Amino acid sequence: MLLELQENISLKSFNSFGFDVSARYFVELKSVEQFEALHQLIADCDLPVLIIGGGSNLILTNDLNQLVVVNRISGHSISEAEDGTLCVTAGAGEDWHTLVRWTLEQGCYGLENLSLIPGTVGAAPMQNIGAYGVELKDRMLSLEAFDLDTGEKQRFSCEECQFGYRDSVFKSRYPGRYLITSVTFSLSRTFKPVLHYGGLIGELEARGIESPGALQLSDLICETRNSKLPQPELIGNAGSFFKNPVIQTQQAEQLKERYPGLVSFADKPGYSKLAAGWLIDQLGWKGRREGDAGVYEKQALVLVNYGDASGQDILELAGDIQADVYTNFGVMLEIEPRCYP
Ligand code: FAD
Ligand code: NAP
């Protein structure tokens, strides 16, 4: 299958914020077999490369004088190890939520708390996606990637990905160097629900469900997410705009004396994680709007594009929020999505 190189393509429909910037060169990668041709193209173009999956974690601030590669590598399979563990391998271009639901329908459990996270399988390891008390690293076995510098194929174990809170070796140490082509998960035939997080138990009780099945739990999470988060097809956004800050517990306790309602959770020893949404909400930002850039009315952690906001507009609003949070709480919020160029 030949690669079709296109020029000056609008990326508006390729990023969930809906920023209308263009890519100088643009190509869709549909199979691993096309990689050799892609590697040659990268050498010929001699421009920086940006890989896009679903575009749901991107801030695009200007036209990109780059080669944009949209990953469409598809396919998924299950195999059973001797100890009964199920290994599921999926192509990097597969839609994440579709994969989650497919595993559950196969009686293959472990990904249910990660239901309805937008984007592709190949981007999930980038920031070690997480929700409702489960992170990708808890379920991932290994992944395969091409090193764009050398063209070599490489396998990474879960440990080698150096996963952290919304972090990985691909995000912090080697940004832009690897193209992830497939991810393998270690799942189970036995359903062990993870329910300790957020309001999950309360939501189940409210529905009179004592011990949920995996699809039931997935449905509940989808319902909860839909009630709190803006759907990118309707209002442009990239989910949580800031990471939850992890600070020393001593500082968190001092803050709690001044703000008794402060929402915090125990993290690694000596550290606490603050709910960034709570900090932003306290300062009155929820629902505020500057032009077409705004803070979502139901969730202060989500910045939204009401129409024609640019990446710059969103970053300016984010900068104002960061400054206000820092002045009042002494905590610097870190932006979660990836910013280009
Ligand atoms: P993209 O936005 O296309 O890319 C993100 C980064 O990964 C970029 O740096 C890109 O270059 C790189 N990349 C993409 N594909 C590859 C590849 N194959 N190889 C190498 N690099 C690659 N995140 C969470 O963790 N938890 C949540 O609960 C959550 N909820 C969200 C809710 C909403 C409404 C939205 C809009 C976003 C949410 N996110 C959440 C963020 C986002 O969905 C995830 O980060 C997701 O994994 C991004 O996938 P993507 O394919 O859209 O990545
Ligand atoms: P929520 O349940 O209202 O909780 C608010 C914050 O408190 C979350 O950010 C979560 O941190 C933290 N939290 C809640 N219960 C916790 C516990 N038992 N232990 C430790 N931390 C706890 O949050 P929400 O906005 O509705 O989101 C629900 C889940 O989906 C969260 O896990 C959130 O991370 C995830 N989500 C992520 C994105 C994104 O773009 N990254 C977007 C939407 C939702 P954590 O964020 O560390 O989990």
Image (cartoon, helix red, strand yellow):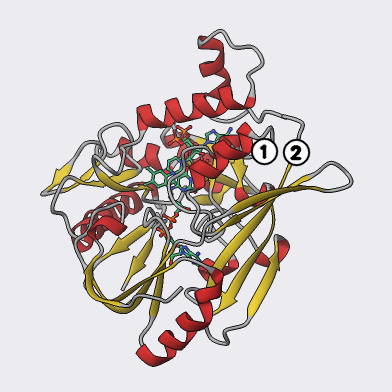
Location of the C terminus by quadrant is bottom left
Name the image quarter holding residue 279: top left
Q: Is residue 6 left or right of residue 306?
A: right
x, y percentage for residue 181? 56, 66
Q: Residue at x 24, y 39 (%)?
A: 234
Q: Residue at x 33, y 43 (%)?
A: 302
Q: Which mark is residue 41?
A: none
Q: Residue at x 52, y 37 (%)?
A: 115
**Of residues 82 and 304, the one drawn nearer to the viewer in this rendering:** 82
Q: Is residue 217 left or right of residue 260?
A: right
**Of residues 259 and 62, the one drawn nearer to the viewer in this rendering:** 62
The local crowd at label 2, few if under 14, some if 14 to 19, many if 20 or more residues have their Cα within 10 Å, is some
Q: Is residue 70 left or right of residue 216?
A: left
* Residue picked out by circle 2: 188
Q: Are marks 1 and 2 in contact (CB under 8 Å)?
A: yes
Q: Is residue 160 visible to us here?
A: yes
x, y percentage for residue 274? 49, 42
Identified by mark 1, the residue type is Gly
Identified by mark 2, the residue type is Ser
The local crowd at label 1, few if under 14, some if 14 to 19, many if 20 or more residues have their Cα within 10 Å, is many
Nearer-N-terminus badge (1/2): 1
x, y percentage for residue 171? 51, 67
* Residue picked out by circle 1: 110
